[in-house]
Amino acid sequence: MNTATFSLSTMAPAIPEIVLALLVLTLLIVDLTLREDERHVTYWLAIVSLVGTAVLTLITVGRPLVVTFHGMFVADLMSQVLKVATLLTVAATLVLGRPYLAARGLLTGEFICLALFGTLGMMVMISAHHFITLYLGLELMALSQYALVSLQRDSVRATEAGMKYFVLGALSSGLLLYGLSMIYGATGSLELTRVAFAIEHGQSQQMLGVFGLVFVVAGIAFKLGAAPFHMWLPDVYHGAATPATILVGAAPKIAAFAFVMRLLANGLQGMTGDWQQMLIALALASLAVGNIVAIAQTNIKRMLAYSTISHMGFLVLGIAAGNDNGYSSAMFYLLTYVLMTLGSFGMILLLSRQGFEAENLDDFKGLNQKSKWYAFMMLILMFSLTGLPPTAGFFGKLAVLQAIWEVGYGWVVVYAVLLSVVGAFYYLRVVKLMYMDPPAGEVTIEPRADARWLLSAIALAVLVLGIAPSSLMELCVRAITASM
Amino acid sequence: MYQGYVLSLAIWVPILFGAAVLLVGNDRNPAPTRWVALAGSILGLAVCIPLWTAFQATAAMQFVEMAPWIPRFNVNYHLGVDGISMPLILLNSLMTVLVVIAHWEVITDKVGQYLAAFLIMSGLINGAFAALDAILFYVFFEAMLIPMFLIIGVWGGPNRVYAAVKFFLYTLLGSLLMLAAFIYLYTQTNGSWEILDFHRVPLGETAQKLIFLAMFMSFAVKVPMWPVHTWLPDAHVEAPTGGSVILAAITLKIGGYGFLRFNMPIAPDASHFFDTFMITLSLVAVVYIGLVALVQQDMKKLIAYSSISHMGFVTLGFFLFNADGILGGLIQMVSHGFISAAMFLCVGVLYDRMHSRQIADYGGVANKMPVFAAFFVFFAMANSGLPGTSGFVGEFMVIMGTIKVSFWYAFLAASTLIFGAAYTLWMVKRVIYGEVANKNVAALKDVGAREMAFLAILAVLVLWMGLHPKAFSDVMNPTIQELLRHVAQSKLG
């Protein structure tokens, strides 16, 4: 696989990334030539680019694992599935966010191009097989996101959020790099297979390796938003314009999951015993912080931010199981979680309109009176976030809890379910506001039909995945076994 | 015949009709919605009839359906009924019809959603009773919370939101612990969620005790047993009549059913270990809650407490580990389904006219509503355990079973015959008899044909079960014998 000569065929596995990169660059130029009232062309081109790349990736699904670019880049079933999910998530974000962005003059070429560059970064992360590619992808994603969050330059809150995000993000990148450099020192390689080989065959300095691992895990925890490295998350979720929040909160989690899988499960699997303990500690903290602090929130975006922290706790728990069962459970959890995030933030976008942000919990009051359909959609999403059957959220939780129990952490399961009851309270409050309170002020649903249809489809998908989760679960299992 | 699909039909017909009601639901013209819902509930009952007619009086699971659902976790869509679950499914399907009839002129707000919630819940409850796969059971068991939460919270009384949230969180806490127990059992059975495999798997003593306690949390909240009963009076008082009926007649039974299906067979040694504990809690419910009922000013609250007290008999009977006790408990469950539903419907009839549940606001109703008064007195008698009514059979059998274990248990249990009569008849006296208390009572009109229909159906059932309990005991007995055999064997080692 490592040939010294240049050959076009070695690039084949990376075609989706290459195509997306070219498309974004083209878009950047095309956007320059457009008049202000032609901005929708950029939007449509972006959608076409994303969906086209997704189709391109979909064609490659099922090909065997290939490592190319001298061990820098890997294409396997897991990366293909996750890339398709990422691309479609970003596309859905743009569709859902378009009315909101247009009403606030944010539907600019910058926003769209940054979103696409971020997507490219995520794709690189997902396919990385080398510390350098991992880091490159991560930074491309992160830098685009810092800019996206602070793009509303007149908004104090957005600027503050962007600033916090940037400073803490840079710090965590530093931690990560520091950790990676130590692992390089311990194993003598930056390439995942060789790192794994060195650790497995006792050719590494264990002490240094574990020391580096601590930093790596801290960096990962920051990117995921797991407590106690979660401080940026509520502020960024709250401060950013809602579509930017989704861009930070949904697809990047997919990339971060791939990142964790590549680093810990592929590269450092020889140290599973070490990072399992660390991840469990992170999960315990995240579940507590996420579920308990969320109760005190009155802003729904902040509430969902804390809910994210608790969900990341579950995700980390699945990875902490440290076997294929756990990884595939975590992957299922991740994909359903992304769907729920899209849906719940999509609802916030749906209720927002010109000059009005539907971001306080009270804005959901009496939604059932105004629109039974969307109240029902939100009901599904909230109960899915709670983890109540028959929704996708339940099977995600079940899979993860089952996996962690099998490796001997029964008490963690009991802890997690007890905190889920705490969590149920604040999701329940949203349902209560929608169904049991009279409407406060007017509730209007203005957005375009495509956003509304997409939102309904997402919420119904959450329900359908709760009734028939089997095929997605099988897909996750196949993806994980093919990649390990 | 369609025997292979009876249970699926019993589950999905109401759910699909519920979805249809949601779609055709139109608040400005609710009549079509109501008729669709009525058709759905009657059809839902009709498809259950083979369960009664074609039931074989053996302990084996019948009407079994099996299909893989989530192969990755070996979860199956596995349904089946035995003598314990079959009567409960029929009871539930019947109650759904009554609830739909009872709502007719009463609920005018969001009719479609109201009826859809009931129909969907009816299907889910049937699913919980019929499921033989733990995850399938859990899905139905938990999904039920959603419509019930909305029923209490949207159509309930002034303090409805508090009651709904309390109901939801109490139940959720219990059931999540049960889920943890299921996951443990899944690892112990090497990857099976079959409830019948759970019954067979050997378990150590500590494991059994923990499993018992986890499931106890779940089912004790549902029953509800003292001291985790406090959500019930709130939920009942605030729920609309239909909600109270389903809550009292059906959802409480899932708690009792859970003890028989899960706690006792899965953890028999722990069940024996905890039997004194369970009997004590049950007796506290019977005696103490009976006394609490005596002082209630609110009719619905009184019936709610009376429900807790009667359900105490059920758990008391189960944990005696003899045939009389368990059979008595089961009969008491079904009978309580009829009687509590009837009592709540009676209070609903009064509430619809007077918009008050306070006993003090009534008096001399019999003068203005003689037909209603006859029904009300009849059901009150049944509630206090008059021989000839279904209320007597279950209580008598449980007391018979208790006396085999201990005289003093039986003595305490029998006190209900006094307390039960006291609080029920005292309420009847204050509400029904005496002079016409005020001009609101004077303006009352007697029950119409619709109200007569549901009260008469229930009266017939109460009498049938009271006079001919053999019809029920024949169905239940083989399963109970089998259960007793199973529970008598230790699973240790």
Image (tube, coloured by chain):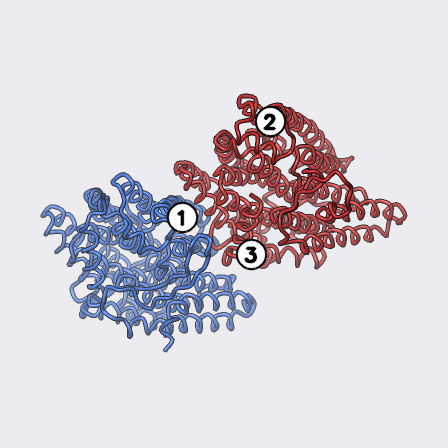
Chain colours: A red, B blue
**Residue placed at 70% from the left, 41% from the top?**
A124
Q: Label 3 to label 2, Cα distance in Å? A: 54 Å
Q: Which residue is mark 1?
A: B167
- Position of B161 compared to B23: left or right? left
Q: Nearer the viewer, residue B279 or B68?
A: B68
Q: Is residue B231 visible?
A: no
Front tag of 1 and 3: 3
- Find numbered disc 3 in the image and state the secondary structure of the residue it sits on: helix
Dot 3 and dot 2 within a common chain: yes
Q: Which residue is mark 2?
A: A187
What amino acid is labelled 2 in the image? Thr
How many neighbours does mark 1 have within 10 angstroms: few (below 14), some (14-19), or many (20 or more)?
A: many
- Find numbered disc 1 in the image and state the secondary structure of the residue it sits on: helix
* Image coordinates for residue B465, horizontal then vertical, percent: 22, 68
Label 3 vs 2, first from the N-terminus: 2
**Residue placed at 19% from the left, 58% from the top?**
B328
Q: Is residue A380 visible?
A: yes
* Image coordinates for residue A450, horizontal then vertical, percent: 70, 58
What amino acid is labelled 1 in the image? Phe
Q: Which residue is mark 3?
A: A376
